[in-house]
Amino acid sequence: MARALDLISCFLVLAAAWAFARGVQALGERKDLVAVYLLVVGALCLKAATDLLRPKAGDA
Amino acid sequence: MTEAIHEQRRRLFLAEVSRVVPGLYGWLATVLAPVLQRGASVFSRGCALLALGALAGSFVLSSSRPRGARFLGVYGFIACCFGAWASLGPLLRSDQLDAVRGALGAVGFLLHALAWGAAPRDPDADLLDNLVAGVPLQPRHKPVRFASGVLGLGIAAGLVPVALAFAVERPSASLLAQTLALGSALLVIGASTDVALRVGKPHTFSAWRVRAGRALWPLAGLTVAVGIGLIWLALR
């Protein structure tokens, strides 16, 4: 299960990069609301990815 | 002994050259070309020349005055480049710039920042043999091979928005797109570094339930955002 969480966090980082890329693209296509939505989704993906791998207090 | 010192000096010289080259490339691609356009102000050309002078000065002073060299290479060079760009006015509009050259110049400035990111060197200390005798210290854990793949993939994925930002042609949104792309690239690369450092160390981690619990709020937010997106798509 721990290995699955590692894979999910890797997937979330890639999903964040995809969301940011599509967000920037949407900005160029004058779809400002879509751009904001995708940037928020990307930020949440990154936060979830790093929180899934955060060690407990005292771990090196 | 003399040969070793000579070799060390040669390495230091090459290190200083490699520190200056990315900035020089960025300057050639993104400062020199715009200021050579017809109609560029004398002030912008002066700033461009001063930027080159600051970079050359940082190289000359690198061995004798490392702090001064750092000041010139980081602050002086970048401030003069900004001065040149700021005084170009409408000549720096996104539709007048070559996208590929701009992208390559941005990579040059990125490498310039990375090259100057290291702490200033003490040339005398580098010449000393500062190895400590004894058994080499063992790392607490070996990084898994999978981790370097994650880091490489993260860097590649993080650069995609930066490349796409150059395709934004709207003058009112191009600067915002560049800023957002650069910020998102930094975030993605930072997060992939975090993931690469922590992945594959199951013995130091909490139980998977605790780990999943820590990411509860961002995962819940993500689920809500994806749900809203699906409803939006369905209603369109």
Image: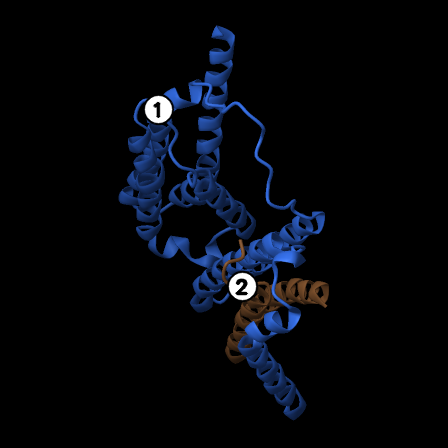
Chain colours: A brown, B blue
Q: Is residue B225 left or right of residue B113?
A: right
Using the image, determine if residue B49 lies above or below residue B152: above
Percent x, y for residue B98?
Answer: 52, 50
Residue B60's tag is 1
Q: Are the numbered discs 1 and 2 placed on the same chain, yes or no?
A: no
Q: Quadrant of residue B50?
A: top left
Mark 1 → mark 2, Cα distance in angstroms: 48 Å
Percent x, y for residue B187?
Answer: 51, 60
Which quarter shows the C terminus of chain B?
A: bottom right
Neighbour class for label 1 at 10 Å: few (<14), some, many (≥20)? some
- Label 2: state its secondary structure: loop
Count of marks placed on residues? 2
Neighbour class for label 2 at 10 Å: few (<14), some, many (≥20)? some
B229 or B40: which is nearer to us? B229
x 61%, y 63%: residue: A13
x 41%, y 40%: residue: B32
On what subunit does the disc labeled 2 rest? Answer: A
Percent x, y for residue B4?
Answer: 51, 12
x 30%, y 26%: residue: B65
Percent x, y for residue B132?
Answer: 49, 25
Q: Disc 2 designates what residue?
A: A56
**Type of amino acid at the residue the image marks with label 2:** Lys
